[in-house]
Structures are given as C-alpha cells and as structure tokens.
C-alpha cells in the first residue's frame, strides 16, 4: 500500500500572492501535500482576530498535483479555520505561517497575523511553525532560508511538538547566518504609535506606526539579541499564558 504523504497547511498575513508564501510552497512541496489558504490581501497585525460579523468566502486560485492554493476574504485565523473546516481532506500533519515579510520577534508575537496562523494550528493540537524574515520589501530574497526551513519542517514532521507549543522562527537580514539560537522572547515595547495628520477637507486622521524599543538590550538569551547578532532565532511559544509563579502568592485572594 502506498504510504500517505504528510499534509501541510500553509497560511500567512501578507496575502496568498506574496513572495514569501510562494517561496515557502516551493521549499516544502516535495515534503508533503500542500494546501494553502491565505487572505486575499495583506492582513498584517490581525493577530488571532477572526470574523464574527461578515460572511466569509473561499476562492480556488491554483491547483496542480500536490498543491492547492485558496484565498479567503477574512483574517489569517479565518483562513486556517476555513481550511480545516472546508478544505482539508484530513487533519494536517503541520501548519505553517509565513514566510512573513518582516520580523515577528519579541512583543510582535502578540500582534502578528503570521503567529495568529501558527497559534490557531497549535490550539487545534497540530504541530505549528511560523517563519519570518527581517525584510519588509516585497521582493525580499528568501532563498538563503531554504536549507534551514526544509530541515526545520522535516524535524517537526518527524518529531512533532508538545501539545500547546508552537515555534516562532525569525531570520535576520544578513549576508551569512552566524548559526541558530533557541531563545526566549525579549521584553520590548512600542512607542510613538499614533501619528496625527490633517486632511485637506478639514478633518484629522491618524496612522498607526510606532517605534520598537528593546527593554533589555544586553540580555543575550533573547530573540532580539540573536537577530541583532546574525543568528536565526527559534522561540518555543506556548498557548498557556498562566503566570504560575503568582498562583501561590495569590492564595489569600481565595474564599
């Protein structure tokens, strides 16, 4: 009997036409059957948002042996939910978010639609990985990532991941990677986030922009440090956000 190939579900927050997701498909298509369901346009910053007040649609964009590409008019998480409910012939062996144009290190983890894809897969108890490159350009060069992404995908397909844990993997924009670091998420903050503008027709409007500040720049065990020094940063990320160290401290709150 012919062995069934792994099923890999891919989505992103840059849209199904983005170079990053197209390169990712090419990198992993020989490792399993690939099903893509991604937003029909850019949805950066949507995190784990899903649509509760608008109808969702699916559009088949491309189909060939071993690869199907669909678009969804909703968020990255909508795309994963729709794929799991309507498109997947069976439970995927792996969910991948990316490759994102721009980094998703530190607190960007909480805002990222790419990580929303990965967290949604993880909450469905499917091994899930996010890949991001620290390059926002539409024509970013993803080719140097190929051997690393292939190795990491093969590792997760073979070994799996603990229930409730996914991987946030960020690649620095350097000529030569210094290596790979498994590290924690840096503590950071965004400031100057709102820019006020005045429209010629007489009303004010605002852009959400901002500047990122690393609040522990000297810490050498963080994703920010790894990326700044040319290392690929792998951050194991868990769904359980309980502050366990506070449970005993707060016992006197109980009644």
Image: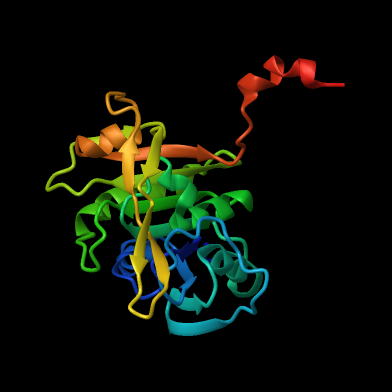
Q: Is residue 105 left or right of residue 36?
A: left
x, y (%) of residue 220?
29, 25
Is 37 located above or below residue 223 in the figure? below
Is 125 located above or below residue 51 in the figure? above
x, y (%) of residue 54?
64, 77
In the rendered image, the quadrant that contains the N terminus is bottom right
Is 168 located above or below residue 199 in the figure? above
Picture mark count: 0
| Residue at x-position 61% and y-position 27% | 243
Is residue 1 something one can see in this rendering? Answer: no
In the rendered image, the quadrant that contains the C terminus is top right
Residue that lies at the very extreme toward the front in this rendered image: 202
Is residue 189 something one can see in this rendering? Answer: yes
Residue that lies at the very extreme toward the right in this rendered image: 255
x, y (%) of residue 236?
46, 37
| Residue at x-position 61% and y-position 20% | 245
211 and 52: which is toward the camera: 211
Residue that lies at the very extreme toward the left in this rendered image: 175
Is 132 located above or below residue 30 in the figure? above
| Residue at x-position 62% and y-position 66% | 90
x, y (%) of residue 177?
18, 42
Residue 66, quarter of the rendered image: bottom left
191 and 82: which is toward the camera: 191
| Residue at x-position 33% and y-position 78% | 200
């Amino acid at each position: 009997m012919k062995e069934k190939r792994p099923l890999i579900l891919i989505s992103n927050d840059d849209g199904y036409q983005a170079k990053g997701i197209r390169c990712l498909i090419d990198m992993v298509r020989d490792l399993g059957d690939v099903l893509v369901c991604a937003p029909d346009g850019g949805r950066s910053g949507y995190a784990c948002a899903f649509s509760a007040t608008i109808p969702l649609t699916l559009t088949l964009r491309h189909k060939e042996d071993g690869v199907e590409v669909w678009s969804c008019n909703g968020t990255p998480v909508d795309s994963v939910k729709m794929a799991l409910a309507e498109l997947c012939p069976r439970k995927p062996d792996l969910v991948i978010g990316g490759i994102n144009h721009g980094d998703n290190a530190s607190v960007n983890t909480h805002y990222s639609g790419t990580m929303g894809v990965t967290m949604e897969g993880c909450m469905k108890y499917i091994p899930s990985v996010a890949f991001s490159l620290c390059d926002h350009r539409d024509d970013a060069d993803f080719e140097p990532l190929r051997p690393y992404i292939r190795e990491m995908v093969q590792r997760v397909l073979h070994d799996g991941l603990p229930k409730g844990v996914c991987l946030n993997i960020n690649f620095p924009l350097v000529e030569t990677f210094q290596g790979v670091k498994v590290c924690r998420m840096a503590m950071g903050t965004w400031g100057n986030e709102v820019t006020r503008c005045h429209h010629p027709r007489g009303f004010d409007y605002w852009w959400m922009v901002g500047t990122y500040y690393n609040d522990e720049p000297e810490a050498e065990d963080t994703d920010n440090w790894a990326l700044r020094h040319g290392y690929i940063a792998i951050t194991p990320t868990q769904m359980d956000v309980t502050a366990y160290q506070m449970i005993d401290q707060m016992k006197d709150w109980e009644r």
